[in-house]
Amino acid sequence: MGWLSFLVGLWEGIPLYIRAVYICWLIYAIFYLVILRYEKEHDLVKRRTFAKLNHAYSFYVLLAIAVFLDRLVIPRAPSYHFTNDEALYDTLATIGYFLMTIGLLVVISGRITLNGFWGGGIYTYDPNFKDFVRTGLYRIVRHPVYFGQILLALGMALIMNISVLWLFPLLTVTFNVIRARAEEVDLHARVGDEYDRYRNATSFIIPWF
């Protein structure tokens, strides 16, 4: 009961506009846990072969700790913020909420469509496997999940109004581009001309761009 009271106290100490950020990321995490369990039960998850690029998540953990410290431990100070203009912040926060909502929906939609078929740069597949996903959001963009993650990170940075958190979308873009490129090298080697035609007709990460 003591721990429950402690957690409730922490939650009550978080401003309402920040709670939405935590709730959004909680939904994101729960969704991925459900997907991973489903993939494991249906033998869709394969052995990771590109783990060396997954260290990006360690940055995410560090930034989450930074947010926790800023909000609950370190006294809030204007120097931590990228804007102190309340009107401007209200506008940016509204944009941030919109981006996080769209980003979460894009990630969920793209990930369900993708199912277990991650690129070979992430998992190992049967060498004879020649198919790739071209339905749903993948008709207009080759990496919609990564696009959704970028929207989530950018929206969070706008809402949190903490200068250091702009590293979060920057790192998300950087590592997602690296991962996407690695996947496309594998798909080109595996599928060849058919994938090249798809790549030439479809946006990379940002739709219609």
Image (spheres, grey):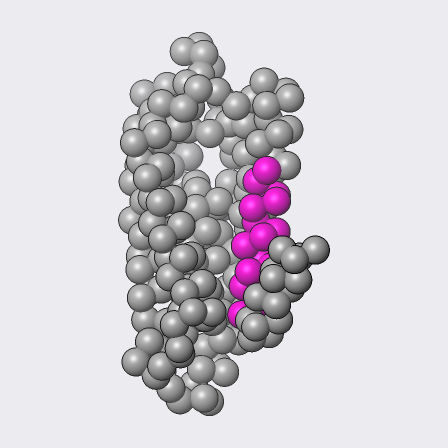
Q: Position of residue 203 (x, y in %)?
A: 40, 47
Span colored in magenta: 17-33
* Residue 24 part of the magenta-drawn span: yes
From this view, report whether residue 5 is shown above or below residue 162: above
Give the main secondary structure, helix, strand or loop, of the magenta stretch: helix
Quadrant including the C terminus: bottom left
Residue 101 quadrant? bottom right
Q: Give the quadrant of the N terminus.
A: bottom right
Residue 202 shown in magenta: no
| Residue 38 percent across, percent down from the top left | 64, 28
Q: Residue at x 41, y 65 (%)?
A: 69
Q: Is residue 122 left or right of residue 138?
A: left
- The residue at the point 57 percent across, 32 percent down is 36
Residue lying farthest right? 1
Residue 165: give x, y in percent of width and height. 35, 64
Evaluate whether residue 20 shows in this view.
no
Q: On screen, 168 above or below 190? A: below
Quarter-wise, where is residue 52 in the image? top left
